[in-house]
Amino acid sequence: MILATAICVGIAPLGAVGTLFSPLVFDDRGNLLNPLAWVGFFLMITFWIVCLVGPLVAWIFWRRKREPLAWSAMSAPLIWGLMMAIVLQFIPG
């Protein structure tokens, strides 16, 4: 659990840098009206938040002796990043 927390917190600055570059999904003509581009934009902006909130919620569940929920919350940044990578593959540009 400690290692997973360290990884999530370590990835959060990379997510913050990704947030700075998130408006670039709208560079291609027509992406402003593309709903998939907006989903990718939302996923990129909120990734660093999920990297910080996920471990916090996981530790709260861990202290309350709910280990399965703790590991589910700890996996949220991984799932969020995977969704972001999948969505961004389908945005033209």
Image (cartoon, helix red, strand yellow):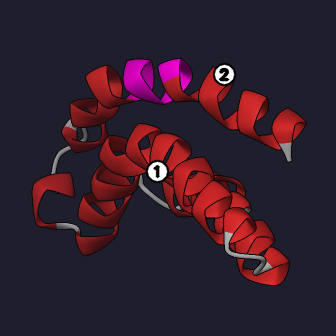
**Is residue 69 depicted above or below 31 in this figure?**
below
Q: Is residue 36 above or below residue 84?
A: below
Q: Is residue 38 magenta?
A: no
Taking the spot 41% from the left edge, 18% from the top edge, the residue there is 17
Magenta stretch mostly in which secondary structure?
helix
Residue at 21% x, 42% y is 26
What amino acid type should be assigned to the residue bearing mark 1? Val
Residue 4 or 18: which is nearer the viewer? 4
For label 1, the SS is helix
- Bounds of the magenta span? 13-18
Q: Position of residue 71 (x, y in %)?
A: 79, 68
Q: Which mark is residue 41?
A: none
Q: Is residue 27 shown above or below 10?
A: below
Disc 1 target residue: 53
Location of residue 86 in the rendering, given as x and y in whole percent from the top left corner: 63, 61
Identified by mark 2, the residue type is Gly
Question: Residue 12 in the image: x percent, y percent?
Answer: 53, 28
Q: Earlier in the sequence, mark 2 or mark 1?
A: 2
Where residue 59 sits: x, y (%)?
A: 66, 55
- Residue marked by disc 2: 10
Give the label, 2 or 1, closer to the camera.
1
Quarter in which the C terminus is drawn: top left
User: From the viewer's perspective, is 89 left or right of 38?
Assistant: right
Closer-to-camera residue (51/79)? 51
- Asked if residue 93 shows in the view, the reply is no
Whether residue 83 sits left or right of residue 78 in the image: it is left
Helix or strand or loop: what does disc 2 sit on? helix
Dots 2, 1 in contact, CB < 8 A: no
Q: Residues within 10 Å of mark 1 (few under 14, many from 20)?
A: some
Q: Is residue 53 left or right of residue 36?
A: right
Residue sitting at x 70%, y 64% = 63
